[in-house]
Image: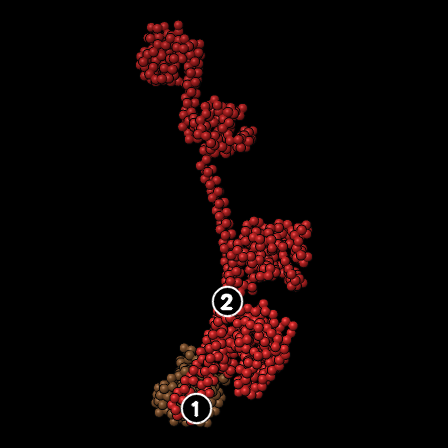
Chain colours: A red, B brown
């Protein structure tokens, strides 16, 4: 048994050296520092003395008198010096080598451990690979990150955690750098222990042995998921912002456009001049040409407005409009659109033109303009179809999209609303004007009535008063009575006429129908009007043919009607004039014509001559008196007899002429009053 | 001041008023149109004129204005006597220079009292 004296035993290194030696088969006797090893060596017959570091300092070096043949290894000295000194002794050399190896191993282990503890404490993932490119080491953080064990990751096992989409790129970078022995950086996604991938930034650098031999790569990775997320968020926000801004701008443009259209429409109640401007809103925004077509009440198409991007196109359009004239024009595209859904033609080709059934002019127009695409949207408001708006594309570079059609529909609906409102407004205005006119006419009539009634009452009252005074001389008194009589009659007439017209209007005017002959009726009317004619020296001419022919009617009413015609004639004929009445007989009806040689009837007034409440003008009333109801009564009575009456003038400078036709046949005579406006035609 | 002109195109009315005034002792002339009225007014120089509004050639308001516009006729006192009862006529009459606006059928006592008042140079 070989024995070694170990001087200085306190530290762990000493302990491990002791352990190595004992394992190698030596018997190690330990002695604290300061003790005299020589004596012990002799005692135990040791072959070697080892002075642990610091031990020789504790012992006076010179005091160590090693027994002869016993080497002393002083570990305070470095290995080189030690080895040199002990060359003579094999035992010393081998123990030295052993210890040195042990020391080297220890150092390596220490270094390794230090590296590991640093590596494992680092906040980065660390790995290394050998010269065979395969990874041979992963630090704790790496393993913790991936949640895998070291042996799973070694070699290329770790690549199982590489995101499939990043594999190719990552390896290409790694191998490229490896081949070039240079540093690299690469980003890839690595699977995290909690599932899911996280982005890491890997930096790798070649490593060399102390001798300068390439040994592989060492790398570290940091988790850049946050950064990546922030980056992508920022990009997303940016593009969202851009999209939003574009949307807002488009929306603003649309609002502005629609507001402009509203302005145009509200500028005036008559929309027609504005249609060209409205069509222009569509050009060049949505198309190269825009046409607004409105449908007239009779279903006929009427071009409402048009706008073109180019003067040339405009000229073509106008030329076509001039050529096509006012014939019956229908447009199948407009008709189709008016059904409610837009008509969209993405390609206007020859075949399409052929089967679209457009009329020849229309098709030629589209060809001449070079229309390659078009869409038509309806103009509908309050459910009423007003027409359509057509958008034509002639520029070959240009196309349209569904949002374009949608905007066109919005434009069209706004325009249609405005048009309809404009139309409604115009209609309301017209209705109001008519109502005002009718009201005015009635007011005038009432004023006239009250005026006419007051006159006779005033006169009668006065004359009666005069008579009562008894102071009137005889012929004045007779005159008074005559005046009274006349005015009573006049007043009675007015009242009768008023009541008759009132009955007519309320549908309570009845005929008493029997078989009558016109001869006696006419004679009675003539006699009744004679006094008035005589007062103005007017001659009454009468011509009767077949006065005895029978017809169904109300003699009293017919007499009243004829009297009215005659009295009118007398009223309007100047002094000394002539009024004529003639009766003739046609196959199925009798005809009575009354003429005078007064001033005749104004052409403008002719259509209204039989209306209630109307006189030619209010001065006529004052000059001639009366209410102007006579002719209305005439018409009413004649029509109840299923006849007709027409008013006109005798030649150009002649007086008025009235023609009454009364059928002989019975069944058409109605006893019930019919109210209605004047439908009488004039000659 | 006893001269009165009666203007009315409705002859029975004009005559009747003229007769009544004559019986009261006035000197009366009658006219049946605006132009006639102006002629007689200038010639006859009445103090009071009873004027109908609804005349065939010109309405009574015009006649009144014409009269009031002429210096020599200024002093004439005008009474409107009309069959028109519209509410704005009294105001128009006043503006045209009438002393009073009467509506037919008139209370003849009232008319006579009015003429008496005016003929005496009084204000009404």
Q: Nearer the viewer, residue A243 or A294?
A: A294
Q: Quadrant of residue B112?
A: bottom left
- Residue A296, horizontal then vertical, whole percent: 58, 61
Left or right of A662? Residue B58 is: left
- Parent chain of label 1: A
Mark 1 Cα shell of 10 Å, populated few (<14), some (14-19), many (≥20): some
Q: Which mark is residue A431?
A: 2
Viewer-side residue, A675 vs A131:
A675
Q: Is residue A278 above or below residue A80?
A: below
> Which residue is at 41% across, 14% downward?
A99
SS for dot 2 = helix
Q: What percent of the width, then of the height, locates residue B95?
A: 41, 82
Instruction: Work out whether mark 2 precedes mark 1 in sequence or the reverse, and give the earlier one.
Output: 2
**Relative to A446, is A539 above or below?**
below
Reading the image, the residue beneath label 1 is A477
Image quarter where the N terminus of chain A lies is: top left
Residue A328 or A489: which is nearer the viewer? A489
Residue A86, quarter of picture: top left
Asked whether residue A230 appears in the rendered view, the answer is yes
Residue A488: % across, % down: 45, 82
> Is A377 positioned to the left or the right of B88 in the image?
right
Cβ atoms under marks 2 and 1 closer than 8 Å: no
Q: Position of residue A148 (x, y in %)?
A: 45, 25
- Which residue is at a point 36% across and 17% down the rendered structure image? A12
Q: Is residue A210 above or below residue A536?
A: above
Residue drawn at 45 percent across, 93 percent down: A475
Give the residue displayed 37% in from the left and 10% down from the top.
A28
In this rendering, the label closer to the viewer, 2 or 1: 1
Q: Callout 2: residue from which chain? A: A
Quick one: SS at disc 1?
helix
Mark 2 and mark 1, same subunit? yes
- Find the distance from the CA under tag 2 to the CA under tag 1: 56 Å
């Amino acid at each position: 048994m070989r024995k070694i004296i170990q001087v200085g035993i306190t530290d762990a290194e000493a302990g491990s050296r002791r352990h190595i030696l004992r394992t190698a088969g030596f018997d190690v006797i330990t002695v604290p520092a300061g003790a005299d090893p020589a004596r012990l060596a002799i005692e135990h017959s040791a072959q070697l003395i080892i002075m642990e570091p610091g031990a020789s300092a504790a012992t006076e070096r010179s005091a160590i008198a090693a027994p002869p043949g016993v080497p002393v290894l002083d570990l305070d000295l470095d290995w080189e010096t030690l080895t040199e000194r002990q060359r003579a002794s094999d035992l010393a050399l081998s123990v030295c080598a052993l210890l040195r190896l042990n020391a080297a191993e220890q150092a390596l282990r220490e270094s390794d451990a230090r590296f590991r503890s640093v590596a494992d404490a680092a906040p980065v993932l660390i790995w290394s690979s050998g010269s065979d490119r395969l990874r041979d080491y992963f630090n704790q953080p790496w393993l913790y990150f991936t949640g895998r064990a070291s042996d799973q990751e070694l070699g290329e096992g770790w690549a199982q955690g590489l995101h499939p989409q990043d594999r190719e790129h990552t390896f290409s970078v790694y191998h490229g750098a490896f081949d070039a022995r240079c540093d690299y950086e690469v980003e890839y996604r690595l699977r995290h222990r909690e599932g899911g991938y996280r982005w890491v930034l890997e930096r790798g650098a070649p490593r060399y042995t102390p001798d300068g031999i390439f040994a592989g790569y060492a790398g570290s990775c940091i988790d850049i998921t946050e950064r990546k997320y922030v980056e992508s968020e920022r990009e997303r926000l940016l593009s969202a912002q851009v999209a939003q801004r574009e949307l807002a701008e488009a929306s603003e443009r649309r609002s502005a456009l629609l507001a402009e259209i509203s302005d145009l429409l509200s500028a005036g109640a008559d929309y027609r001049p504005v249609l060209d401007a409205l069509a222009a809103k569509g050009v060049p925004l949505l198309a190269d040409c825009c046409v607004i077509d409105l449908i007239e009440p009779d279903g006929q198409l009427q071009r409402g407005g048009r706008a073109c991007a180019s003067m040339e196109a405009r000229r073509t359009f106008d030329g076509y409009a001039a050529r096509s004239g006012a014939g019956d024009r229908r447009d199948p595209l407009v008709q189709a659109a008016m059904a409610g859904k837009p008509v969209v033609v993405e390609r206007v080709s020859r075949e399409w033109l052929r089967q679209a059934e457009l009329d020849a002019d229309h098709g030629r127009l589209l060809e001449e303009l070079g229309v390659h695409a078009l869409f038509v949207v309806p103009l509908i408001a309050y459910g009423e179809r007003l027409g359509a708006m057509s958008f034509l594309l002639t520029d070959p570079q240009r196309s349209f999209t569904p949002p374009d059609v949608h905007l066109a529909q919005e434009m069209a609906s706004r325009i249609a609303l405005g048009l309809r409102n404009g139309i409604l407004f115009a209609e309301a205005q017209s209705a109001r004007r008519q109502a005002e006119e009718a009201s005015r006419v009635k007011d005038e009539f009432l004023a006239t009535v009250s005026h006419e009634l007051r006159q006779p009452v005033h006169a009668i009252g006065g004359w009666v008063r005069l008579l009562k005074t008894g102071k009137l001389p005889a012929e004045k008194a007779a005159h008074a009575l005559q005046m009274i009589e006349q005015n009573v009659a006049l007043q009675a007439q007015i009242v009768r006429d008023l009541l008759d017209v009132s009955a007519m209007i309320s549908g309570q005017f009845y005929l008493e129908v029997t078989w009558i002959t016109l001869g006696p009726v006419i004679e009675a009317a003539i006699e009744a009007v004679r006094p008035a004619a005589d007062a103005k020296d007017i001659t009454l001419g009468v011509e009767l043919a077949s006065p005895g022919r029978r017809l169904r009617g109300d003699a009293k009413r017919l007499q009243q009607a004829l009297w009215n015609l005659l009295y009118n004639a007398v009223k309007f004929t100047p002094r000394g004039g002539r009024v004529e009445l003639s009766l003739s007989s046609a196959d199925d009806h009798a005809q009575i014509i009354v003429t005078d040689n007064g001033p005749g009837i104004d052409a403008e007034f002719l259509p209204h001559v039989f209306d209630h409440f109307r006189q030619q003008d209010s001065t006529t009333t004052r000059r001639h008196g009366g209410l102007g109801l006579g002719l209305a009564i005439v018409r009413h009575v004649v029509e109840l007899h299923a006849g007709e009456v027409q008013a006109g003038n005798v030649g150009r400078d002649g007086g008025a002429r009235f023609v009454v036709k009364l059928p002989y046949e019975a069944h058409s005579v109605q006893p019930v009053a019919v109210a209605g406006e004047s439908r009488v035609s004039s000659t | 001041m006893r001269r009165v002109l009666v203007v009315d195109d409705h002859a029975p009315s004009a005559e009747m008023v003229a007769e009544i005034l004559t019986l009261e002792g006035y000197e009366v002339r009658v006219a049946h149109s605006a132009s006639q009225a102006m002629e007689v007014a200038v010639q006859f120089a009445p103090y009071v004129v009873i004027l109908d509004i609804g005349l065939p050639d010109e309405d009574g308001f015009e006649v009144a204005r014409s009269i009031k516009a002429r210096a020599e006729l200024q002093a004439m006192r005008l009474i409107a006597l009309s069959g028109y009862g519209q509410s704005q006529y009294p105001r128009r009459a006043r503006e045209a220079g009438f002393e009073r606006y009467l509506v037919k059928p008139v209370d003849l006592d009232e008319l006579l009292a009015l003429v008496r008042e005016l003929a005496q140079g009084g204000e009404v």
